[in-house]
Image (tube, rainbow, N blue to C red):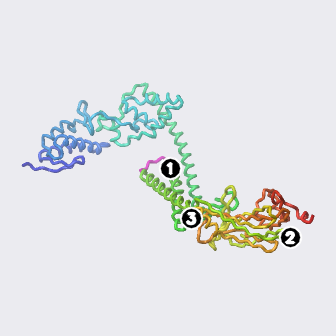
Amino acid sequence: MDKTININLGGVLFSIDEDAYRILRDYLHAIDVKFRNIPGGNETIEDIESRIAEIFQSQKGLAGIITKENVEEMIRTIGNPEDFGQTGAEEPVYGTPGPRKTLFRNPENTIISGVCGGIGAYLNTDPVWIRILFIVFSFVFGIGFFVYLALWIAVPVASSDSQKKEMYGGGHNWAMPQEWDKHPKSNVGKAFNEVFRAIGKVLFIIVRIILIIFGISLVFTGFLALLTFVMVFVFKYPGAFSTDITGFNLAYMPDFLNYIITPQMIPWVKALLAIVFSLPLIALIYGGIRLIFWFRARDGFIWLAGFILWVMSATALSIILFNEGIGFAETGKTTSREYFSVASDTLFIRSGAKLSDISIDKEITVPGEEDDVFYISDYKKEIYFRTNLNLYTDDDNSASVEIRKRSAGRSTLDARRKSEKLLYNFDIQGNTLYLDEFFTIPPERKWSFDYVSVSVRVPEGTVIFMDKTVEGLFHPRRDADYFSDSDHRFWKMTDNGPDYIDPPKMHK
């Protein structure tokens, strides 16, 4: 029995007898000598080996043994290496037989992007006529321009030898790369091509200048935004990065998270916020650099990994914030009222505890219909809020002070329980009502859209005096100039509510 040898050909394992192996070895060696020193030769050799494996599989199958007759039949099918490229000689066929083509952008015949060159190769025609058609249709509502732009984006460039083979089909001799772009051209076509190339070079220069300017803008914008993000949220640099709203400073927002988010979630939220904001800015800078220097890089995996990381971070951040937001789903209110007597026709409302008595480290204003101001004490780890004061005429000729508290929670009952625990104090001593300027939340819980308002009701005709601090809590529908004069602090209750009066009128 003849000796058999196991070989791997084109990724397929075959058993071949010794005589057939010698013939196949010499044949493959001749092919290697033929193609190894030309551009794309290694890919050509691989294609030939794949074709040989297909022929062997069709002859004997994987279970059979390749014989000398099988090898000789294969050589007759493909041809001898020395015959490749000669006129009239049978061309080597790789892959599926036939002139199947794939549309690519042709880098060997390009004016701008190779779209027309690729279509010309696909249709086996001179690309100059395709270029003329695009120009003609560009004057018809810009159809040619937009179609060209779409093909430029959608059609890949034939950058490898195998892609160029697919672009031209099976009717060309791929052993001779210099033949890839030889298409018949008329003198008119050559003239048009020269004109198009000249125009293309001018357009290319213009486009490059525009892209460089755009790239510089992207780099500058991305770098400035990233620097701002780092300076504000990492180094807490105030001043230049604050808004024009009094007391509002972005640098304090990371600290404010400690009072509105569950403590265990704060490090995750800060890390995810950093990723969600910084990754797009880094991508913006990198994209701008690529536009400026116009370099190629195998960075598809990096872009994909960065995009996946951003999506995962944004999703995780959204889930955390949604879960935290459930705690603000419902609102609940509690109201308490205390009656008191006024010995004379004048009620004095003075400030009790003041914000100026507390060491306030940060002040944050959140703009809205009514600006919410948060005062943070890092030393006490507490957050304070101003109260609102309202004055009403009491129809029963009685005096009272009403405290309304409001909070948010997962349910109405939960919100009411939170509102009951809000810390606010007032005191009544004779004709004087002492009101704290602020309220705070219990140290064991986070902020929940808490709000406290104070309503003072007195009989009609009562004169009310408010000191400057209390007057700052009162928001009547009056001219703001009344609050700028330190001597004007007297109000008289009428049917329509409080009315400003000059101090001398009190004695009339």
In this view, the residue farthest toward the left is 1
Q: CA distance from mark 2 to mark 1?
A: 76 Å
| Label 3 neighbour load within 10 Å: few <14, some 14-19, many 20+ | many
| Label 1 neighbour load within 10 Å: few <14, some 14-19, many 20+ | some
Res. 402 visible in picture: yes
What's the residue type where badge 2 is placed?
Answer: Ser
Q: Which residues are magenta?
A: 288-298
Any mark on residue 344, and which?
A: 2
Please identify, in this view, whether the residue under mark 3 or under mark 2 is nearer the observer: 2
Q: Position of residue 179 (x, y in %)?
A: 33, 35
Task: Pick whichever, 218 or 107, lies toward us.
Answer: 218
Q: Earlier in the sequence, mark 1 or mark 3?
A: 3
Q: Does residue 259 appear to the left or right of 453 in the view shown? A: left
- Secondary structure of the residue carrying tag 2 is loop
* Residue under numbered circle 3: 261
Q: Position of residue 448 (x, y in %)?
A: 61, 63
In this view, the residue farthest toward the front is 396
Task: Pick whichever, 325 or 289, lies toward us.
Answer: 325
Q: CA distance from mark 3 to mark 2?
A: 49 Å
- Magenta stretch: residue 296 in it? yes
Q: Position of residue 57 (x, y in %)?
A: 19, 43
- Secondary structure of the residue carrying tag 3 is loop
Any mark on residue 383, and which?
A: none
What's the residue type where badge 3 is placed?
Answer: Ile
* Residue under numbered circle 1: 287
- Secondary structure of the residue carrying tag 1 is helix
Task: Pick whichever, 127 or 340, lies toward us.
Answer: 340
Name the residue at 69% across, 70% down: 424
Q: Earlier in the sequence, mark 2 or mark 1?
A: 1
